Amino acid sequence: MSRFADIGAAVIGTGFIGTVHVEQLRRIGVAVRGVLGSTAERGAARAEALSVRRAYRSLDEILSDPSVQVVHVTSPNHLHVPQASAILTAGKHVVCEKPLAMTATESAGLVTEAEASGLVNAVNFNIRFYPLHQHVRERVAAGDLGEVRFVTGHYFQDWLLHDTDWNWRLDPSQGGALRAVGDIGSHWLDLMAFVTGQPIVSVMADLATFVTARQEPTGPVETFSTDRSADTVTRPMGTEDTATLLLRFANGARGSVAVSQISAGRKNSLQWEIDGSAGAAWWDSETPDHLWLGHRDRPNELLLRNPALMGEAGRAAAALPGGHVEGFGDTFGALFRAIYADVLAGRPNRHPPYADFAAGHDEMLVNDAIARSAELGRWVDVDRSPQGGAGARPTDARMTTTEVRA
């Protein structure tokens, strides 16, 4: 029997990501008590399709269910703050999809609520939990690459290439002012701060919208759907299709990343390279079990994910032996194992391997700087002052290299 078998969870949202949450919670042995859909009819249909015993009709029903100790929020972005706040107020642990909020002011409030509650709180930056990411973070902290100097990469998708492609994320009132950056770029930015141990301190951003008008279907649409609706309404677009970002990290390292949701053929391509004074590392999400290690004075290496060859954190995130590929869905299981270990302990981890609300808020501050930089056309510092950050603790979730080593 799973050590998490006595913990009950409910999932808000029954789309692509909500389904992944349900499936991976079951995989680690958590009892999924029920789901909450966007409508009662959709919730009932998805509960039946997922073989979930209950379709809740409202958030209040979830909060009043004594068999639920943890609630997962996978609803559209504009609902994250009110739902997460209500969950904390009800005394339940909460796992929230990213971005944590629509604005940094909102996320700062959630950080305060979460700290006061003493409850486990997490943001679903699941990309951290590819086992090789947990492993390479330990190796960077140990000095294997030397001093981190240069961090580069991209995150490309193509699911919004056509003007007939539509999703609620395209509506700023539901998705927020940043779209490509907020939706997928935030994963890359969080990951690089996590792996290097270095917060991003300054940004220079260029945002572009190429598809300036889109056809919104009059009915509901699933994320990544290729179906075309016969009945549409033309909507002007203001959020970015692509972003090109220059970065400065706390230790003086420089970086750059390109983000796109209109790159034909790229379904979910995340790449990064870290160049240090003693070596380099490179990773590609399309070959997630491979970590390239670059050297100047000896042959380069290719580490295949293998629990026997990784450090403690990498082994903890791995669920399968070497040679058995672990992919996107598996990262949720690894993330949830880390979160639910703290739920089992009954309290938050002060320095969790997952992103807590403080880390989610810190990413909101980075996004604010990106939006401001694009508006002004110049470098902008990330404002972590009490006024800008409302007392958040970015180094708690994104430890510096010194803190990792300690």
Image: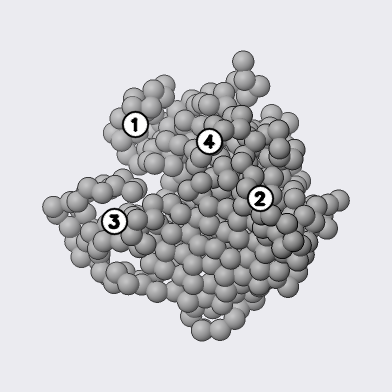
In front: mark 2 or mark 1? 2
Give the residue at mark 2.
Answer: 301
Quarter of the image holding residue 335? top right
Instruction: Verify CB contact (< 8 Å) between mark 3 and mark 2.
Output: no
Can the viewer see residue 97?
no
Helix, strand, or loop for circle 4?
loop
Give the residue at mark 4.
Answer: 325
The answer to whether 206 is drawn above or below residue 37 in the figure is below
Name the residue located 25 percent from the left edge and 69 percent from the top edge.
213
* Residue furthest left as drawn: 230
In front: mark 2 or mark 4? 2
* Residue furthest right as drawn: 406
Give the residue at mark 3.
Answer: 166
Give the residue at mark 1.
Answer: 46
In front: mark 3 or mark 2? 2
In front: mark 1 or mark 3? 3
